[in-house]
Image (tube, rainbow, N blue to C red):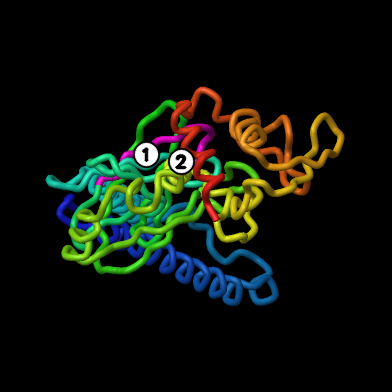
């Protein structure tokens, strides 16, 4: 039986190949028999039945026993693979991921956060999955893992990155207009590189408190800092910029000062920037006042 000593990839791939192989053999075999029977017993060659046999005991036993064995074998390997996916190896690194429209935020045991998942290659990683708003699905195809992020429910997956590299993370559940942008990566580092990353300053000190808050609250999933287009308007040079908004069905031109940015964070549906969908969730009651002030100061002082 497959055990948790194997990686998730090693647990899933043999099961898939086993089932695919059986399906392929049956497809080719049944197709070949159908063609043979069609040619040999064509009505033009045999206009009248030549056999009156009503049963064949060995044949009936064969087509009952053989499929039953195949189905039981597929169930056995499938169940063993499922157990391997759910039994986390001892000593796995613990990480928490939170999905929201439309980004992922990873929180590590020391409290730091990032918008990419940094892990040491070759070590098991257990990911606790949460959602802040709607149904998402945490999907890393390279490691054959996919698990729903359900609001109000905790879920988990585990995996081992076999070698250093960058591996895609997707949301596999349609979660709104920004669903296709809900992409990030697993950054698998060598043990030495991972230790170096852990020794760096906290995200708040390294990137600046404002940018760390934007990462923690998932803002960078919809807004860029470099002027590129995303689901929402870019945050590059946002403070003092003239913006056209739609409020109450009418267009207005405003200056993005501290008061406007505060309303945009706490009441985003009240004034929607023209050309963008009204999909941003409200952060009223979700962001503490002191962190909101830090964000506004960041916008004001950022070049």
- Residue at figure coordinates x 37%, y 66% from the top left: 21
- Residue 278: horizontal and vertical position, in percent? 70, 38
Q: Residue furthest top?
A: 285
| Image-based side of 205 in relation to 141, left or right | left
Residue at 38% x, 53% y is: 207
State the image quarter where residue 265 is shown.
top right
Q: Magenta span covers which residues? A: 126-137
The crowding category of the residue bearing disc 2, from other C-alpha atoms within 10 Å (few below 14, some 14 to 19, many at least 20), is many
Q: Which residue is mark 1?
A: 129
Element type at mark 2:
strand
- Report the residue at 41% width, 51% height from top: 115
Between 236 and 109, the one lying in front of the other is: 236
- Judge whether residue 123 can be spotted in this image: yes
Task: Kindly report the distance in space between the C-alpha atoms of the residues bearing marks 1 and 2.
Answer: 8 Å
Q: Nearer the viewer, residue 251 or 35?
A: 251
Which is more toward the observer, 297 or 211? 297
**Do residues under tags 1 and 2 come within 8 Å of each other at their CB atoms?**
yes
Give the mark nearest the N terminus, 1 or 2.
2
Indicate yes or no whether the magenta region holds residue 290. no
Magenta segment's dominant SS is: strand
Q: Residue at x 40, y 63 (%)?
A: 20
Q: Is residue 235 above or below residue 294?
A: below
**Residue 99 circle label:** 2
In this rendering, the answer to whether 224 lies above or below 40 is: above
Q: Position of residue 135 (x, y in %)?
A: 51, 36
């Amino acid at each position: 039986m497959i055990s948790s000593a194997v990686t998730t990839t090693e647990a899933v791939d043999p099961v898939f190949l086993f089932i695919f192989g059986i399906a392929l053999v049956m497809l080719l075999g049944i197709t070949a028999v159908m063609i043979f029977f069609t040619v040999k017993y064509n009505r033009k060659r045999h206009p009248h039945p030549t056999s009156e046999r009503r049963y064949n005991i060995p044949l009936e036993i064969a087509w009952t026993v053989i499929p039953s064995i195949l189905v039981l074998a597929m169930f056995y390997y499938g169940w063993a693979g499922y157990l391997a996916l759910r039994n986390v190896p001892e000593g796995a690194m613990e990480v928490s991921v939170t999905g929201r429209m439309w980004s992922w935020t990873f929180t590590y045991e020391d409290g730091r956060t990032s918008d990419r998942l940094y892990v040491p290659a070759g070590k098991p990683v257990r990911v606790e999955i949460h959602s802040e708003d709607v149904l998402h699905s945490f999907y890393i195809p390279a490691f054959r893992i996919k698990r729903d992020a359900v609001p109000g429910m905790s879920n988990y997956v585990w995996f081992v990155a076999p070698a250093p590299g960058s591996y895609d993370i997707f949301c596999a559940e349609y979660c709104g207009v920004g669903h296709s942008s809900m992409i990030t990566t697993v950054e698998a580092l060598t043990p030495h590189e991972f230790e170096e990353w852990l020794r760096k300053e906290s995200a708040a000190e390294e990137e600046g408190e404002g940018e760390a808050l934007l990462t923690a609250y998932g803002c960078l999933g919809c807004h860029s800092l470099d002027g590129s287009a995303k689901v929402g308007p870019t945050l590059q040079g946002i403070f003092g910029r003239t913006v056209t908004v739609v409020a109450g069905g009418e267009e207005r031109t405003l200056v993005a000062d501290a008061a406007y940015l505060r309303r945009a964070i706490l009441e985003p549906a009240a004034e929607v920037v023209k050309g963008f969908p009204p999909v941003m969730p409200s952060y009223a009651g979700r962001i503490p006042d002191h962190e909101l002030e830090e964000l506004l100061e960041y916008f004001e002082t950022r070049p």
